[in-house]
Image (tube, rainbow, N blue to C red):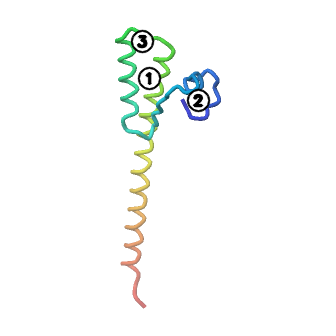
């Protein structure tokens, strides 16, 4: 869930936690987050605590998929930004190299 939605939803996992209850947050920025969520899903189903079609399991899988997609998008964005900067530097160098001296 998106941070703002989690905080504003009175029925969210975070807001259902009792005062003083420990919680653990995984961020999409963490490369291990999607697989950690998927492992939690496997453990919950294997233990009999959840069924694969339970709302919490579906929400968790959707969250893991969204986190993985967000990381892939951010990675591609960084790659394209680096590529653009490299191309711009090459163009500046070519312009400088081809500028006649006066």
Residue 77 vertical position relative to residue 18 in the rendered view, above or below: below
Say few, some or many: other residues with alpha carbon within 10 Å of mark 2 (under 14 / 14 to 19 / 20 or more).
some
Of discs 3 and 2, which sits in the foreground?
2
Q: Position of residue 94 (x, y in %)?
A: 37, 73
Q: Residue at x 36, y 17 (%)?
A: 43
Residue 91: where, in percent of width, then height? 40, 68
Residue 6 x %, y % = 58, 29
Classify mark 3: residues with Cα within 10 Å, few (<14), some (14-19) or many (20+): some
For the C terminus, give its image quadrant: bottom left
| Lateral position of residue 10 relative to residue 25, left or right | right
Could you tell whether 27 is left or right of 2 in the image?
left
**Please, what secondary structure does the residue beneath circle 2 have?**
helix
Give the distance between the C-alpha atoms of the residues marked 2 and 1, in whole angstroms: 16 Å
Residue drawn 41% across and 34% down? 68
Q: Which residue is mark 2?
A: 6
Say which residue appears at 52% left-offset and 25% top-offset: 21
Residue 21 lies, with reference to residue 90, above or below; the image says above
Q: Earlier in the sequence, mark 2 or mark 1?
A: 2
Residue 48 lies left or right of residue 2; in this view the side is left
Quarter occupied by residue 99:
bottom left
Res. 45 mark = none
Tag 3, which secondary structure?
A: loop
- Residue beneath label 3, please? 52
Q: Secondary structure at mark 1?
A: helix
Count up the numbered dots: 3
20 or 29, which lies in front?
A: 20
Q: Residue beneath label 1, please?
A: 61
Residue 60's spot in the image, x, y percent?
46, 23
């Amino acid at each position: 869930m998106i941070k703002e939605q989690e905080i504003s939803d009175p029925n969210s996992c975070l807001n259902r936690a009792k005062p003083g209850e420990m919680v653990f947050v995984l961020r999409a920025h963490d490369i291990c987050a999607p697989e950690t969520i998927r492992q939690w899903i496997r453990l919950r189903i294997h233990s009999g605590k959840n069924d694969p079609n339970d709302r919490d399991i579906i929400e968790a899988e959707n969250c893991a998929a969204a986190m993985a997609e967000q990381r892939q998008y951010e990675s591609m964005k960084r790659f394209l930004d680096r590529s653009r900067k490299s191309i711009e530097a090459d163009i500046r160098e070519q312009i400088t190299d081809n500028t006649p001296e006066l």
